[in-house]
Amino acid sequence: MDLLLILTYTALCVAVFKIFRIPLNKWTVPTAVLGGVVLIGGLLLIMNYNHPYSEVVRQYYTTTPMIPDIKGRIIDVPVQQNQPLEAGDVLFKIDPEPFEDKVEGLEGEIAAAKKDLKRAEELFAKKLGSERDLDQTRAKVDDLNAQLEDARYDLEQTVVTAPDDGFVTQQTLRPGMMALPLSMRPVMTFVHKQEGIYIGWFRQNSLLRLKKGDAAEVVLDSLPGVILSAEVDFVFPAIGEGQLQPGADFMRFDQQKSPGRDAVALRITDPRYAEYRLPGGRFGQAAVYTEHFNHVGILRKVLLRMAAWMNYVFPLH
């Protein structure tokens, strides 16, 4: 962005020298250079404080590793990768037969245990049985009911559904594979529906006048020449460079990291955004326009549009 401003001033000076045939001597050249230093320096100072710019803006998205609660063999995977899903859509199914057999077996045991409990109650009422036998029979019924509840829960877990709106990508799960309830071995990864939230990394001294609701614009590398309107959603209250975790070691000066930048969440408000259907993790640039020095904000908008057009020529940063 700064380079674009310098190149624009240089081109303007060359045009003025050519059009008005100003000679190049020890007075005109230093005057143009000094004027550029003052003019560009002043503009950059005003813009960076009142209309901050970030050359690093990225969309971050949330994923959930899908880990089954039970062990079993996969019998069906109806989901297709990159297919839009709604919460509750079936992702995959585990063979329910072993769990159905367990539920049926426990239901039979409970029926028999209830009969034993009824006989124990009758014997105790006739003073032919002990209270201990009655308590043991009741405890057995309660234990079997608890086992049945767990078995029914396991049976429900044979059908795994989407936790939210989103999609599954890089889907390699196939029928016949074994699913294990291990945290380090998810069977697939679910990508939650992406919102139009981008994180811009701004210099710390650029946030003096920035606040929630300020207008912003985002330029994406994948959309050359397109300017997306946005607004400041919130400023993160902490940065990672200052994070300190409990430990036995004391802080040392040689462990100091770079000063770091403040993370600002920008929400895309442009109605065209949903039409592009771009992949997650997009990268770009952004500028925020505060209510101060609005006339200088126009220059920031011009420079941002020049950066957007440059994506046609220089698609890589």
Image: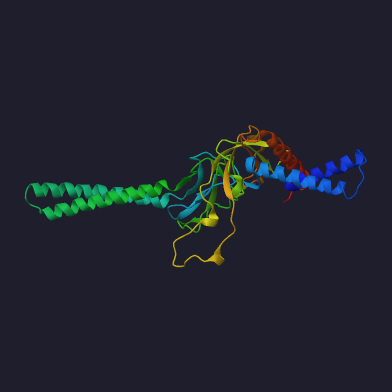
Which of the 4 quarters of the picture holds residue 220?
top right
In the picture as drawn, the residue positioned furthest to the top comes out as 271
Query: Foreground residue, 156 or 62?
Result: 62
Q: Report the front residue among 111 and 92.
A: 92
Q: Where's residue 306, x and y in %?
A: 75, 41
- Looking at the image, can residue 300 be seen? yes
In this image, 32 relative to 148: left or right? right
Q: Is residue 40 left or right of residue 134?
A: right
User: Which residue, as the protein is rendered here, is positioned at the far front?
Assistant: 27
Quadrant hosting residue 270: top right
Q: Residue 82 at x, y = what percent?
A: 60, 44
Q: Which color mode does the image show?
A: rainbow
219 or 176, which lies in front? 219
Tell me: 278 left or right of 315.
Answer: left
| x and y, in percent, of residue 118 in the image | 17, 46
Residue 269 position by quadrant: top right
Is there any visible trace of residue 4 in the rendered image?
no
- Furthest toward the left, the residue is 127
Q: Is residue 312 left or right of residue 51?
A: right
Residue at image x 26%, y 52%? 143
